[in-house]
Image (spheres, rainbow, N blue to C red):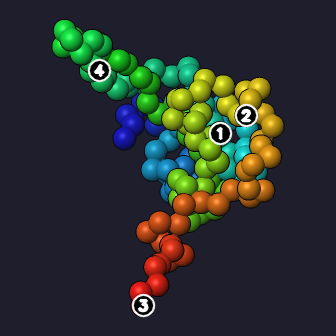
Amino acid sequence: MSTILRTWRNLRRIGIKEYAHQMMYIGDTKAGTYIASDRAGNKYYENLEEELPYNAIRKPTDHSRGGQRLTVSAVRTRWVDYKEKEYDPGQIEPGWHAWMSYLVDKPPTEDAILKTMQRPWELPDHRPNLTASRAAYKTYST
């Protein structure tokens, strides 16, 4: 949920049409830089200019002493606009998933390893995870 000031500022930046689209499909208003799109047509965005709330997570540093350090990570700075209206997070390709999850700093379009877009052992088309859907694998009982 965003503040009223942030909502008005994003409305001015993105316009009424994109504002209505985001409220319908994302449930929040976001303004940022278009990074790229993947093979499925999903569009990826990033916003590093806006001050956003942070997630504070305490992680142990040394198991012998029991000490903890505070790890701070930004939230809501990267997002995807799915091409399909009935979207599922499994529709994101692995390279883009790594970027969205902050596992890598550069998007697949800029990363030298991920720039090839397809390795020889990968399937030609990305297949989403069908678990918990009607198309999920069902075992045959004899």
Q: Residue at x 44, y 24 (%)?
A: 74
Residue 12 can be seen, yes or no: no
Numbered disc 2: secondary structure: helix
Residue 84 position (above or below residue 52): below
Amino acid type of the residue that numbered disc 1 sits on in the rendered structure: Gly
Which residue matches tag 2?
Answer: 114
The tag earlier along the polypeptide, 4 or 1, is: 4
Q: Which mark is residue 59?
A: 4
The tag earlier along the polypeptide, 3 or 1, is: 1
Real-space CA distance between mark 3 and mark 1, rounded to the nearest whole angstrom: 40 Å
The tag earlier along the polypeptide, 1 or 2, is: 1
Within 10 Å of disc 3 (Cα), the crowding (few <14, some 14-19, many 20+) is few
Q: Are marks 1 and 2 in contact (CB under 8 Å)?
A: yes
* Position in image of residue 63 (x %, y %): 24, 16
The tag earlier along the polypeptide, 3 or 2, is: 2
Image depth: mark 3 or mark 2 in front: 3
Within 10 Å of disc 1 (Cα), the crowding (few <14, some 14-19, many 20+) is many
Numbered disc 4: secondary structure: strand
Question: Taking 25 as reference, is 35 left or right?
Answer: right
Q: Are marks 3 and 2 in contact (CB under 8 Å)?
A: no
Amino acid type of the residue that numbered disc 4 sits on in the rendered structure: Lys
Q: Which mark is residue 72?
A: none
Q: Quadrant of the N terminus?
A: top left
The tag earlier along the polypeptide, 3 or 4, is: 4
Which residue matches tag 1?
Answer: 95
Question: Taking 27 as reference, is 55 left or right?
Answer: left
Residue 53 position (above or below residue 125): above
The tag earlier along the polypeptide, 4 or 2, is: 4
